[in-house]
Image (cartoon, grey):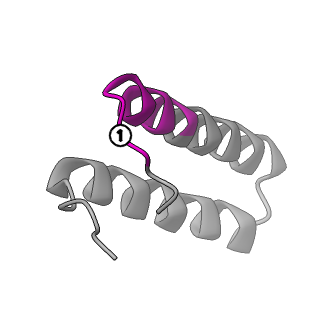
Amino acid sequence: MQYEKLDIVNLVVVIGLVAALITAIFYMNNELSTTISAGLLGYLGGLVRVNNSTNKDITK
């Protein structure tokens, strides 16, 4: 198996959004947690779309 090299910027953004989401859930802020989760899903969807446009199979 061959894995792609991790991009440090994307990794930091995802970790930051997950930490913010957990904090928002812990403090019971429903609107903020909904917004952060939608942003996280959109960001991850954008990463997959960009990776697929380079014609690389990321499911290996």
The answer to whether 57 is drawn above or below residue 59 in the figure is above
| SS class, disc 1 | loop
Judge left or right: residue 15 versus residue 25: left
Q: Is residue 16 a member of the stretch shown in magenta?
A: no
Judge left or right: residue 12 versus residue 58: left
The quadrant the N terminus occupies is: bottom left
Residue type marked 1: Lys
The answer to whether 6 is drawn above or below residue 40 in the figure is below
Which of the two residues, 6 or 8, is positioned nearer the viewer here?
A: 6
Q: Quadrant of residue 52?
A: top left
Residue 59: x and y in percent read 52, 57
Circle 1 residue:
56
**Residue under the image location 80 percent in, 64 percent down:** 28
**How would you rate the neighbour count of disc 1 (Cα within 10 Å): few for under 14, some for 14-19, many for 20 or more?**
few
Q: What main secondary structure does the magenta stretch of the protein show?
A: helix
**Residue under the image location 49 percent in, 38 percent down:** 48
Magenta region: 45-57
Residue 8: x and y in percent read 17, 57
